[in-house]
Amino acid sequence: MIATVLPGPADLGAWRSAARGLLGAGVPPEQAEWRVAGDAPGLFAGDAAPPAATSPFHVPRAFVALAEIAIRHRDPERFALLYRVLWRLTHGEPALMQVATDADIVRLEAMAKAVRRDAHKMHAFLRFRQVETEAGVRHVAWFEPEHHIEEAEAGFFVRRFAGLRWSIVTPRRTVHWDGQELRFGPGGRRQDVPPDDAVEPLWRAYYAAIFNPARLKPGAMRAEMPRKYWRNMPETAEIPRLIADAPRRAAEMVARGASLPNPNPQKPRHLPPPSHVEPDMDLLDTAADPKEALAALARELAGRNDLPDFARRATQLVFGEGPPGAPLMFVGEQPGDEEDIQGRPFVGPAGRLLDRALAEAEVPRGETYVTNAVKHFKFEPRGKRRLHQSPDAGDIAYYRPFLLREIGIVGPRLLVALGATALRALAGKALPVMKTRGTLVEGPEGLPVFTTVHPSFLLRVPDEEAQRREYARFVDDLRAAHARVA
């Protein structure tokens, strides 16, 4: 028996190095023992050090991606399971990752799913409390993760709260960010974190304001937000009262009737107000202030008297959103129902999925520019519902000059076409999305266009397993696009 002692519970680099050495020495899985420094040795633990790494070998990228997540699971057998799968991949089963019913693969996938769920809960249910220290204000939070995710998820909070000084305390690790450097330390206790602060009433008021009594499902709510997280979240104190009051509020909502879209669709509600001097339309794209140039372009389009008929039925124009100069610009098809009501791109179901995929790909949405090829919602009325209709070639051609001017003002280094409509608008001709996916095609003024699917495509995949695979592939596409401009 050869014992391998890893320095940390989720150290993929150390595991890979040790696994490479064991594999090169021909050590079968049943002869390898794995443990983390500080753990007690097993009953049949050996004293021999693991062999040094030998020549490299090749494994499917899917295994590496799965191992990176599954190794964070708390199951002490995770290292041995990963090595067993690695051994099988390199000893006669190169297509093992494609066997979805294999017991080892099923177990690894279940581990990865549990880790992803734990990371999601950390993102959603962690709450900072503001404390005064000698060095100034610091925001401190307590969280109890199920798995070893502290190091992996620290980057998420650095990106989201880059301007704050904060600490996250867990039973195993502490994470500290001072605005420039990320540090890790030993775990702490819940009493190290203050129970509340002056912001608590705001959280409670915010939660009460967004609570929808007509969609109350206590069972689903408890499944998504288990009670173990409630004591760390100030807004949960409002839940019993809100549940008790839900029937009365729901009845009042029914009595009021449905909220209608903007009755005056020719007056967009969310466009920045014009400056006191209306700029010359011929000079918009070269204006000194790109934000004003984008706002003026939006006003110009909204005020045209030759808009397509469907644009006149829409609630408002939905223009692009993001910082001018963003290196990455995402172009979708057209706004949907929620975007039409709110006047912002990608805020509906597809937009929320895009946000989640961008977060997993470590692409900050706030540093990108998002827009659509068609700027108004094209729909077919069905009673009180508005059913999406795909834009045709004429619709794309009408909006394309405005899209090109928008691109010129933003000045991205890479365009990402989300779906066939966006690809046609950017390339100037119809191209097959699946054949060009993950590759570059030439766009306006020679700008490169990276092709992938529209996030709404993922929402339409009926099979859960296929949906998971397609979502993972979409995240890989976003990561690859970001890497090209990083």
Image (cartoon, helix red, strand yellow):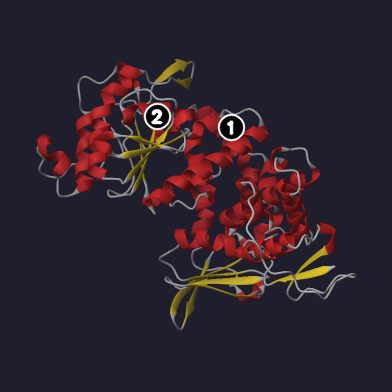
Q: Nearer the viewer, residue 89 or 443?
A: 89
Above or below, 220 relative to 44 = above
Q: Residue at x 53, y 28 (%)?
A: 255
Measure how far apart labels 2 and 1 are at the Cα level: 37 Å
Q: Name the residue type under label 2.
A: Glu
**x, y percent for residue 323:** 31, 49
**Residue type at tag 1:** Ala
The residue that mark 2 highlights is 333
At 75% across and 76% down in the image, what residue appears?
38
**Neighbour tally class for label 2: few under 14, some 14-19, many 20 plus, Cα within 10 Å:** many
Q: Residues within 10 Å of mark 1 (few under 14, many from 20)?
A: few
Question: Which quadrant would residue 229 be assigned to in this image?
Answer: bottom right
Q: Is residue 28 left or right of residue 473?
A: right
Residue at the spot of label 1 = 251
Residue 273 position, x and y percent, is: 22, 42
Q: Is residue 412 something one can see in this rendering?
A: yes
Q: Secondary structure at mark 1?
A: helix
Comparing 68 with 315, the one in front is: 68
The quadrant of the rendering that contains the N terminus is: bottom right
Q: Is residue 282 above or below residue 228?
A: above
Q: Can residue 374 be seen? A: no
Please tell me whether residue 357 is drawn above or below residue 77 in the rendered image: above
User: Looking at the picture, how far across and down is residue 106, in whole percent?
Assistant: 76, 44
Q: Which quadrant would the C terminus be assigned to in this image? A: bottom left
Tag of residue 204: none
For residue 432, what is the image quadrant?
top left
Q: Residue at x 23, y 40 (%)?
A: 408
